Amino acid sequence: MPYISVAVSLPVMKSYTYKVPDHLQEFCSPGVRVLVPFGKRRVTGYILAGQESCEGFTAKKILDVLDDHPLFPESEILFFKWISDYYIYPLGDVIKAALPSGFDRHDVSFVSVTQKGRARLDAEGLTPGEKQVLDYILPKESCSLKQLKKNCQNTTINALIRRMEKEDLIWVSSVLKKDGAKIKKEKFITPGDEPTTVIRMSKKREKILALVKEKQEISLTGLKVIIPTAPALIKPLALAGYIKIIQRQVFRDPLGEPVEPDTPPKLTFEQEAAVKQVESKFNLGFCSYLLSGITGSGKTEVYMRLVWDVIEKGKQAIVLVPEISLISQTERRFRARFGDKTAVIHSSLSQGERLDQWRKIALKKVSIVIGTRSSIFAPFENIGIIIVDEEHDTSYKQETGLRYNARDLAVVRGKMNACPVILGSATPSVQSYQNVVMKRFEELKLETRINQHPLPGITLVDLKKYKDARGYDRIITPQLSKEIRHCLDKGDQALIFLNRRGFATSPLCMDCGKSLSCKYCDVTMTLHKGLNVYQCHFCGYNRSVNTKCPSCNSSKIKPLGFGTEKVESMMKAMFPDARLTRMDQDTTSRKGTTIKILKSIRNRNVDIIVGTQMLAKGHDFPSITLVGVICADLSLSLPDFRAGERTFQLLAQVAGRAGRGQSRGKVIMQTYNPEHFIIEAAKKQDFMEFFQNEVPYRKALMYPPFSRMIQLKISGSDFTKVKDYAVLVAQTLKALLEKTGKQKAMVQILGPIEASIQKISSRFRWQILVKSPSSVLVNSLVKAMMDHPKITSKSGIRLVVDVDPYSLM
Ligand code: ADP
Ligand code: ZN
Ligand code: ZN
């Protein structure tokens, strides 16, 4: 078509029409990027649709087409538009945020010939174009895509490459073979069809044939264990057609163990019921479910069964998992079940590896994507199910740029694709459970643990009793230390949890009484003994341990407050015979260190593990029988209406780390507020008790899920300018609200107020909160404000719109 509508990646809310010169028309389709003139600039844009005509003005011509195939399917554009509208974020930037970065580095793609490609070359039946491509690459093993295109003078080379890639004749990757070491290939042996020639059979050859026949498929590594000379023996057998040798990608878990294929177990009665309930409505299209079930009740198995059904039907599945330091147990199990039908997207992939995964999805080489929040944007066209595991997890909320919530977007995309959406958790979010109460979600329940393992027993210890105790007892109470001793004597492992890192967390000047705060932020610095510095956890600024008080120049700074580093040193002193390790952001910042720590726990080379919430999520340590929570209330007093919810979830999660193996676990939870309803509910591990106590308070204060909120964050380095701008924004909002008449009573505008952390990285922070039971009202009010002629962008001042904010600090 002669015209296209384009979303440019600039802060503009609408799309623009451009003219396509004749010679570029065949390359333009929705999802392809183009280079366009915009004012005096040239910018990247995404084609949204073709257009027959352009009325009323002369459209500018596009300058170039940047892709040889669409980066996302046309069907996803509606989803992007919804996001742009709801999160009040420019459409072009939404698309940019949804795609993995690095597409621009075109020429970094490498091509090589696959096994199938080699076989075809021998068997002939290739088109001259295909043959030319293979002949060019083969002698070099691999070459860059750029080289290939230059040397194969063929006008349809892009389409040809894409087709050959789809047919598995060539392999295109953004990861150079050298550093693509993570993709491990292995030889597998399967029975041949009919031998073409008869060869002499030795004892060993016969044994190989028998083994292959029995197993139908065996890895060369596995065969080597039985017959060490197998590698030399299989070649003639394969040549004669007795067996086939195939190359296959093998998966490894983060600890380096191969992920063995598994066989689905027979579902329990409860699991069966849950699966049936979803399946019975497959044909009805969209429906959202909340799968609530304590840890170990078999939720993952339910997910896998449903995904299986969906891919059998030729559809695709998106499975979202929380961001954790390494690949989770869930990812491992999906790989075991679905092998190379899955693409995996998580934070420890390099940019190239991420692009490769994306490519697999776009080329439909996989039908399942399992990964962290950005996987919700996977370019699938025919989605059959979307699953969000641990739906309460805060890592589904993106906190920079496009501030979306992948859990919420899962429901939106499910609706657009007319497919079921399953949110699962042992500790559902208040919002999702309220959706069950309101009958917007159907509840699926798993109430018993698979192997009837009882949940760990939780004992509360009142820290108030030890306020004036001497020595370590104030932090590690006698009850806790007794249990640790007991655990060590049994030869088990103990996990000690404290969600605060560092040695001393509130250093105080003994002369002037001020706490040592960061030069650039309005926060107290933390002493890190191992690093010999005071550190700011917000901006990273360091002061030497010998620093003097910035206010009075005194050198008497007392290291008050404690974090994981201090607890570790106490443990060392109290249990000199125990082997200790610490797992927090400080000990895992270097590449590979997380794996090392996890391995040492798994191999039982440590007895006591001290850690932050990093340890609470997703890992499975069968020999931990004791969990000690140093201070259960740390997050309870944060100025955030979700503080209670977070605390409950975190405590339930940590407690769930105990007793995952054969013996029953024990949890000692130290707290200053043993009678607080959150702590009580956590002790009983009773989600309903927590929910029923939390809801009246949210309702009374009109907090989500009983209202919708948009937070406006205004920041900048000049205090007065920031404040003035915040006042202007609030005034504009209030004036606009005045004009709405009847709806006025439905919306609250709170602020402007200074944020509770008033300064971060030298930027002063102000906030405004817009609240209403109606999400449409808050949305339209904020949009109207943004479009208001008085609200122009001011240099040095940033205005961020956070829809459904998670962190109000
Ligand atoms: P959840 O995801 O709810 O924590 P999992 O799915 O991890 O629970 O299940 C806990 C354990 O029980 C896993 O080791 C899993 O392999 C096993 N399991 C799940 N379903 C079954 C079943 N139907 N029969 C036997 N074992 C099962
Ligand atoms: Zn001082
Ligand atoms: Zn700082």
Image: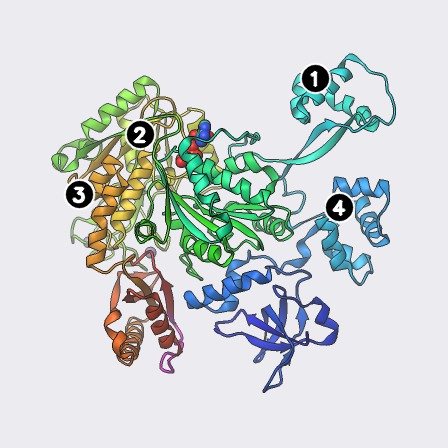
| Image point (57%, 38%), residue name | 338
Residue 227: which disc? 1
Residue at the disc numbered 4? 169
SS at mark 3 in the image: loop
Q: Residue most toward the bottom?
A: 56
- On whether ligand 1 comes within 8 Å of the CB at mark 3, the answer is no
Q: Mark 2 and mark 3: span between their CA atoms?
A: 22 Å
Q: Is residue 248 left or right of residue 16?
A: right
Taking the magenta stretch, the answer to whether it contains residue 601 is: no
Residue 584: percent from left, percent from top: 37, 40
Identified by mark 4, the residue type is: Leu
Residue at the disc numbered 2? 455
User: If the image is split into quadrants, where does the N terminus sit?
Assistant: bottom right
Q: Which residues are magenta?
A: 788-798
> 206 and 793: which one is in front?
206
Residue at the disc numbered 3? 676
Crowding near the residue tagged with mark 2, few <14, some 14–19, many ≥20 C-alpha atoms within 10 Å: many
Q: Mark 3 and mark 1: span between their CA atoms?
A: 64 Å
